[in-house]
């Protein structure tokens, strides 16, 4: 499928960068040069920092974390220590990137109540009217970003911003015309904001799986490793995210008035 091919092509480019980083990190770790190890690792971590930032923002707006207690830097600083101390767990360059996200997830789980989500939203997602969707969108736009917790490196323009592409939602070729209409009527920025709003209300596992797939370009097997779930569970989480977004887009923007 087009979406899967996009993932694989992007992963090839990412793998080249990670392979170079892995070889350098392995050399510095063998030499016990922690200063050089940390400097090289710093070039890998901004992507991970964005992932942590997104998780913290969601937890703050769901009141699953106390405001002002945690920052992205707190988790990143701990990751520097954990990666250096547990380097022997990473057996190859292919394991480095999933291992980093997995370790970040473990740190986050110790702090975030993962069961907090909008159950009413989840149960009624197929039945909201356009007016109700509009009201939720307006409320999310006003309140959904939470407190700023980003570390300085996240603003580096050399790193890709979040992109929720429609092809990650509508996988079937038969829906290309629908995608084109949404692109034309709404534009990418509005679509991405809508997707963020929908994901924000869904269970954290659903949000995490889809974010790892669509933003960080992991395939379901890697996501299963990161989230400590099996492949079938991850596929179900991705399907839940897609169905929720497809239903919401249809009811807010395409359904006959």
Image (cartoon, helix red, strand yellow):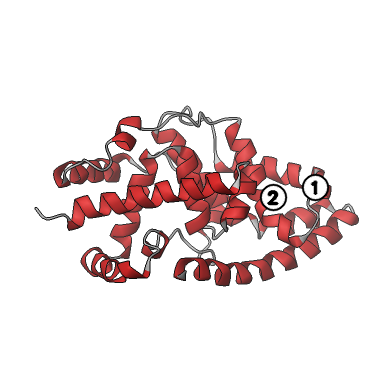
- Residue 76 in view (yes/no): no
Q: Which residue is mark 2?
A: 99
Task: Indicate the position of residue 23 as horizontal and vertical percent values.
Answer: 80, 64
The vertical placement of 42 against 54, above or below, is below
Which is nearer the eye, 241 or 190?
A: 241
Residue at the right extreme, as displayed: 31
Estimate how packed mark 2 is, as few (under 14), some (14 to 19) or many (20 or more) residues with alpha carbons within 10 Å: some
Callout 2 secondary element: helix
Q: Which residue is mark 1?
A: 89
Callout 1 secondary element: helix
* Residue found 66% across the figure and 53% down from its top: 98
Task: Indicate the position of residue 219 as horizontal and vertical percent values.
Answer: 57, 58
Q: Earlier in the sequence, mark 1 or mark 2?
A: 1
Q: Going by the image, does 27 lie left or right of 149? A: right
- Residue 67 in view (yes/no): yes
The vertical placement of 93 against 177, above or below, is above
Circle count: 2
Mark 1–mark 2 Cα distance, whole angstroms, equals 9 Å
């Amino acid at each position: 499928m087009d979406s899967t091919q996009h993932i694989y092509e992007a992963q090839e480019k990412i793998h080249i960068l990670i392979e170079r980083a892995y070889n350098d990190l392995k050399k510095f770790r063998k030499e016990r040069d922690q200063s050089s190890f940390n400097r090289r690792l710093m070039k890998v971590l901004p992507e991970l920092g964005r992932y942590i930032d997104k998780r913290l923002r969601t937890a703050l707006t769901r009141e699953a974390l106390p405001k002002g207690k945690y920052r992205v830097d707190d988790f990143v600083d701990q990751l520097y220590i954990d990666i250096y101390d547990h380097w022997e767990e990473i057996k190859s360059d292919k394991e480095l990137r999933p291992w980093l996200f997995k370790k970040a997830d473990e740190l986050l789980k110790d702090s975030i109540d993962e069961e907090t989500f909008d159950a009413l939203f989840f149960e009624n997602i197929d039945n909201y009217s356009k007016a109700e969707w509009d009201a939720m969108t307006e409320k999310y736009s006003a309140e959904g970003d939470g407190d700023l917790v980003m570390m300085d490196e996240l603003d580096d323009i050399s790193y890709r911003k979040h992109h929720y592409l429609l092809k990650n939602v509508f996988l079937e070729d038969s829906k290309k015309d629908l995608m084109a209409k949404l692109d034309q009527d709404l534009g990418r920025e509005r679509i991405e904001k809508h997707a963020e709003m929908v994901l924000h209300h869904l269970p954290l596992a659903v949000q995490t799986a889809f974010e790892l797939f669509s933003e960080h370009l992991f395939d379901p097997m890697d996501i299963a490793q990161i989230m400590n779930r099996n492949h079938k569970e991850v596929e179900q989480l991705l399907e839940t995210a897609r169905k929720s977004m497809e239903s919401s887009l249809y009811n807010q923007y395409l359904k006959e008035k």
